[in-house]
Image (cartoon, rainbow, N blue to C red):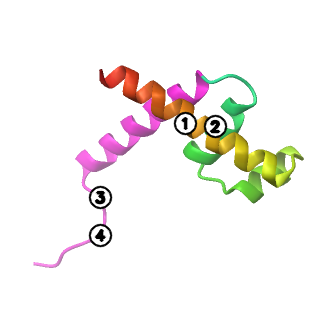
Amino acid sequence: MQETNEPSPEENILDTEVKQQLYAQCNKLKKPYREVAIDYFYRELVATEIAQKTGRNLKTVQTQIYRAKTMLQKKYKKEAD
């Protein structure tokens, strides 16, 4: 029996559901954190790509990613409680 690295249908559904929840949480953030969070966490762009796409300074984008991450952690923790 040969193993494949392809995810099972259950894993695909779970991954899709997690991504949908992540997108929904990112969408609840205020601007400009919303756009940065969606690009970074959902679309999986790196900070340099986001900076180029938005025309913002790289350091500004990195700070916004850090703050968005903190906000998302608080939202997830609040929902878990």
Contact? badges 4 and 1 (CB < 8 Å): no
Residue shown at 41%/29% (left/top)?
A: 76
Contact? badges 1 and 2 (CB < 8 Å): yes
Q: Is residue 22 above or below residue 80?
A: below
The residue that disc 3 covers is 7
The residue that disc 4 covers is 5
Q: Position of residue 17 (x, y in %)?
A: 37, 35
Q: Is residue 49 above or below residue 66?
A: below
Nearer the observer, disc 3 or disc 2? 2
Q: Residues within 10 Å of mark 1 (few under 14, many from 20)?
A: few
The residue that disc 1 covers is 70
* Cα–Cα span, label 1 and label 2: 5 Å
Residue shown at 29%/70% (left/top)?
A: 5
* Cα–Cα span, label 3 and label 2: 32 Å
Q: Is residue 70 left or right of residue 13?
A: right
Q: Nearer the viewer, residue 27 or 60?
A: 60
Q: Secondary structure at mark 2?
A: helix
Highlighted magenta segment, given as a residue range: 1-28
Res 46 quadrant in image: bottom right
Query: At label 3, which amino acid type do we have?
Result: Pro
Nearer the observer, disc 2 or disc 4? 2
* Cα–Cα span, label 2 and label 4: 35 Å
* Cα–Cα span, label 4 and label 3: 6 Å
Nearer the observer, disc 3 or disc 1? 1
